[in-house]
Image: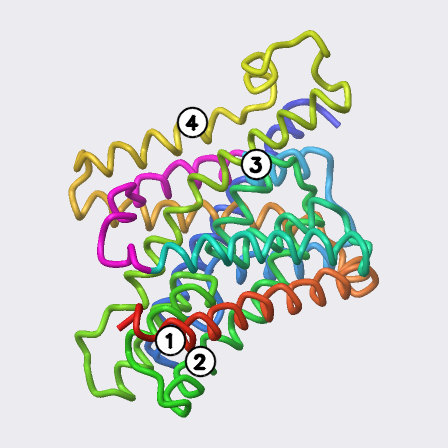
Amino acid sequence: MSEKKSTIQTVAAVALCAAIGILAQNTTGLQKAAFGRVVVGGPMLALLVSMIACNILPSVSKGFKEGTSFCAKKFLNWGIIATGGTLSFAAIMGTGVKALPLIILNIFIAFAASIWIGRKALKVSDNTAVLVGGGTCICGGTAIATLSRIIKASAEEIAFAMAAIFLFDTLAAFAYPYIISALGFTPGQFAFIAGTAINDTSSVAGAQATYQAIIGDPEFQGALNVKLVRTTMLIFVALAWTLIMSAKAKRTGEAAATDSAFAVVKKTFPMFILVFAAMAALNTMGFFSADGVKMLGKAGKYLFAGALAGVGFKIKFSEVFSKGVKPITLGGITWACVAISSFLFAVLFKGYID
């Protein structure tokens, strides 16, 4: 194959992934109109579409694979950077600050449960366990996308973690407003539970909208306020895993034993995380306007969807059915641990919440 033809195929693959991402993300508006909420997030839908295409196509060329790999890596980095511009360190001191103890507790519970059970009982890869833990305790697909670049997860591991998070996130978003109302919990308790135990921001928004209708208060924003603080914690979780991976590099020999801590971090540190944190700092200082923050949020979602389209072109259904059961089981167990933690906190510390 000529170099020119291979380049054309690479460009075509990038264009296709971008188109799938744009179309998938644009369906969220249609889903809201039809169902009152987003049922399948744009990135997850893009992943499913490209996986179907991958399994229908008899084969793809080397040039096409290079294009999909470019999207899976570069679109992901750019999406994370754009998302950074929507976060704010100041949010930690905002209206959701009271939920910080529960958010931090759930972060430790999610990672402890996913890594311990993943290793001891289910025997999934360490990367899969980390992605499931991060996706459960922070913000679903965004956390998975961010951590996958830091820990160098494979496309297969990303796909399995995304599937595990999506299934239980959807269940929680639909069920929690009704369960919490039936239990007679207060709006404050709902805010803590929904804001800390539903993964994706769009799912929290959907659950909150349902709860607003149940209590007859369209102004209630408690769950999203808590979720904003929880999403901001992605900055610190990302930095923590960067340090963990740096220490691992030194321990396993990827970094020289004589290297300083700074040298090890420099070798293993993904530079896009630095830009991600800088964008969050700029937003904290008010550098971006409200419209600018919205544009960055939309850009991040489109880029994530395009990146997941690239990932999907690497996944075969046979692998999902043969290897994906354990990651999904792990996702369910980790989700249950976080849910139990949030419900118990809401009951035991009702006076603190309200």
For the residue labelled by badge 3, is the local secondary structure a helix, a strand or a loop? helix
The reply to whether the C-beta atoms of the residues labelled 3 and 2 are less than 8 Å apart is no
Q: Name the residue beneath numbered marker 3.
A: 241
For the residue labelled by badge 2, is the local secondary structure a helix, a strand or a loop? helix
Q: Name the residue beneath numbered marker 4.
A: 274
Q: Name the residue beneath numbered marker 2.
A: 176
Residue located at (42% from left, 74% from top): 348
Which of the 4 image quarters holds residue 65?
Answer: top right
Mark 3 and mark 4: Cα distance apart in space = 13 Å
Side of 56 relative to 212 (left or right): right
For the residue labelled by badge 4, is the local secondary structure a helix, a strand or a loop? helix
Q: Position of residue 133 (x, y in %)?
A: 60, 54
Q: Which of marks 4 and 2 is nearer the N terminus?
A: 2
Side of 109 relative to 315 (left or right): left
Q: Position of residue 261 (x, y in %)?
A: 58, 16
For the residue labelled by badge 1, is the local secondary structure a helix, a strand or a loop? helix
The reply to whether the C-beta atoms of the residues labelled 3 and 4 are less than 8 Å apart is no
The reply to whether the C-beta atoms of the residues labelled 2 and 1 are less than 8 Å apart is yes
Q: Which of marks 4 and 2 is in front?
A: 2
Q: Nearer the viewer, mark 1 or mark 3?
A: 3
**What type is the residue that disc 1 sits on?**
Ala
**What type is the residue that disc 4 sits on?**
Leu
State the quadrant of the C terminus.
bottom left
Numbered range of the magenta stretch? 74-98
> Predominant secondary structure in magenta?
helix
Residue located at (63% from left, 47% from top): 311
**What type is the residue that disc 2 sits on?**
Tyr
Viewer-closest of 246 and 163: 246
